[in-house]
Amino acid sequence: MITPLGALESLDLTDPNTCFEILSYDKHQVAEGMVVESLFDQIIERIPSLVEGEEVRVLDVDTFVVRNSKVFAQGYAFVLSWKEPKQTGLKRYLMALGKVFTTYQVEYVERVGFRARLVREGRPASEWQKLEALLDTLSVRSATNYTVDSRVRKQDRQLASFWGYLRETYGGRLAQKVAVPRLLVNWGIQPWFRSVWNIDRVLLVGDSLWVLEAKHKFPYEHSGRLQFGLNNGEAYLIRDLVRGGINVIHSIVVKPYWDMNVGSSYLINNYKAKQNAIVVGRTVDMAAIEKIIGSTTARSPGHTTMTGDGKLKYKPLIASDFALLSNLADPDSVARGIAQLMNGSLEHRCEDDNLRTARIT
């Protein structure tokens, strides 16, 4: 695999500077999103070890989904697994994905690159092969260069996220948590497809699979009500996960600064702002996602796309349809709220006034 930094096998991913260079090719919101994901991982660790008497396990995987540009219903899921192949819950997860996607297990081999194999019914159904060779057979178009508009690659925000938080937080796991997933997406999968969607966190609760999606955004007002946007691709991804028998929680860390020019660094060093960063969440079943998909589509500016150009189609989500979990400064309360969402006992609805009161101007 060839990257802007050279051949993948020549890169020293133990060097933090290399990891930062890889991350710097993305829009700055990617680095900031990693900060939010890390903070959410700390919340997930606090979810009670038992939910309704069922043991909770977090799968150590990164999952990316693409679609055939000519046949939208034909999707492919790539699951990058970090622990031993037999980690608890992995087979069940691969089986669930296999109900709705053609599913591939992916491994990163140090100084060699990525390899993949087909999985059916949770079991290997082909031999390992180089990822590039596989994608060449799957894609209906030739590979294109992945480039991101410089206007959405603000280095000060990338530097703040990486050197101010990610480097210290992940330490020896920096390559695993930052560099390798971005290499896989940007120069492994993305060149062959129009869009790539990732699945954030996967949990096994007893025998049930849960996907926990965590976003970081502020609401907008429409007809006197506060709303959030869910891009169309993510909406259809949620629908397919539900079709595969996977439960979904869509959660949002609500930025207290309703300003796109304010990044996530306040989450690192501003306790007052963390107190004002309200966390909301909702379970999304089939009835809910069909209602969302059936709603009117809106369009957002280019800065919301992964490459910084074009327009992004999205569906509106009413803020009051979410439950109020707590605020980011109280991760234990957020974790308890997520557990209550899982067992259906959380009824504390988010009101627009909750968000307006927490807003910092």
Image (cartoon, grey):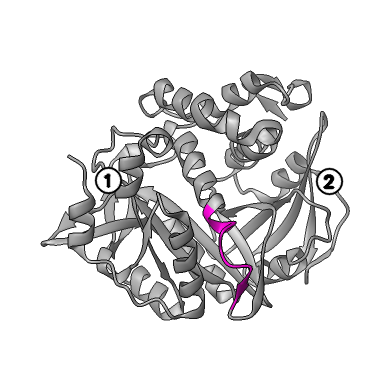
**Residue 78 vs residue 165: left or right?**
right
**According to the image, label 2 marks what residue?**
129
**According to the image, label 1 marks what residue?**
256
In what element is the residue under mark 1?
A: loop
Label 1 neighbourhood size at 10 Å, few (<14), some (14-19), many (20+)? Answer: many
Q: Is residue 44 magenta?
A: yes
- For the C terminus, give its image quadrant: top left
Mark 1 vs mark 2: give the one in front.
1
Residue drawn at (88%, 53%), measured in percent from left and top? 127
Residue nearest the viewer, comparing 88 with 119: 88
Residue drawn at (19%, 62%), measured in percent from left and top? 352
- For the N terminus, give its image quadrant: top right
Residue drawn at (83%, 31%), measured in percent from left and top? 112
Residue 195 appears anywhere in the view: no
Which amino acid type corresponds to the residue marked 2 in the rendered image? Answer: Gln
**Residue 314 vs residue 139: left or right?**
left
Q: Are marks 1 and 2 in contact (CB under 8 Å)?
A: no
Residue nearest the viewer, comparing 332 with 350: 332
